[in-house]
Amino acid sequence: MFKSLIAIAAVTAVLASPGLPTKVVPIQTIVAHPYKIEVVTKPSYVGTNGMAKAIIKPSKGYKWNTEYPATFQIQKTVYTNATPINEGDLKLVKGAAIVCLPYKGEKEGRREINVTVNFSVCNKEECLVFRNQRLNLSFIVLKKEKTNPRK
């Protein structure tokens, strides 16, 4: 705290000194991540297959780093096993990385599945690596509708 006060006093003294030219320099703030993640679920009915997708879209000025070994680790559940998704399971479509997770609904309801992602995106100056990014996918299982035969 004391060091902070000294630093503030020193800056104030320099700024208050007469005769020194002052120059206003704008400070840029980066608020957004260099990527966006969308999660899409195609619900299943009890006993049928559904699909959950994670779509990672690099922001404008960034691209998916194909040289970085991206990994996706899925939480072990009754619907999935904990095997990592291989690089070959990742599809690049229009610059976005898409991972599809098929599942089979055994019981009605919504199940949140945790996924840990490691990946990289690059712009013209640098590549950024994101490790242990967590996201939740939803497996949605609907009650099987009874079909009424027409008389």
Image: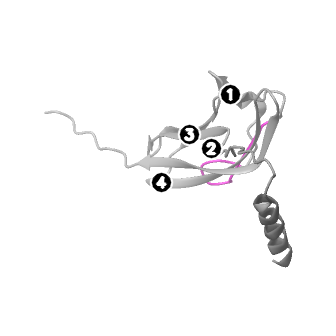
Three-letter residue code for mark 2 = Ala
Q: Disc 3 and disc 1: Cα gap in Å?
A: 19 Å
User: Whole-Å distance between the Cαs marked 3 and 4?
Assistant: 18 Å
Q: Which residue, given by chain and number where applicable, does mark 2 sit on? A: 32
Q: Is residue 101 above or below residue 67?
A: below
Which of labels 3 and 1 is toward the front? 1
- Which one is closest to the eye, mark 2 or mark 3? 2
The amino acid on which the numbered mark 1 sits, given as a three-letter code, is: Gly
How far apart marks 1 and 4 lie (CA) works out to 36 Å
Q: Is residue 95 left or right of residue 3?
A: left
**Which region shows up in magenta?**
70-81
Disc marking residue 61 = 1
User: Marks 2 and 3, how far apart in space?
Assistant: 15 Å
Check whether the beta carbons of the residues at disc 3 and disc 4 lie within 8 A of each other.
no
Circle 4: residue type:
Arg
Work out which residue is located at the far top of the displayed protein and give it.
Answer: 94
Lower position in the chain sequence, tag 1 or tag 2: 2
Q: Secondary structure at mark 1?
A: loop
In-front residue for pair 46/19: 19
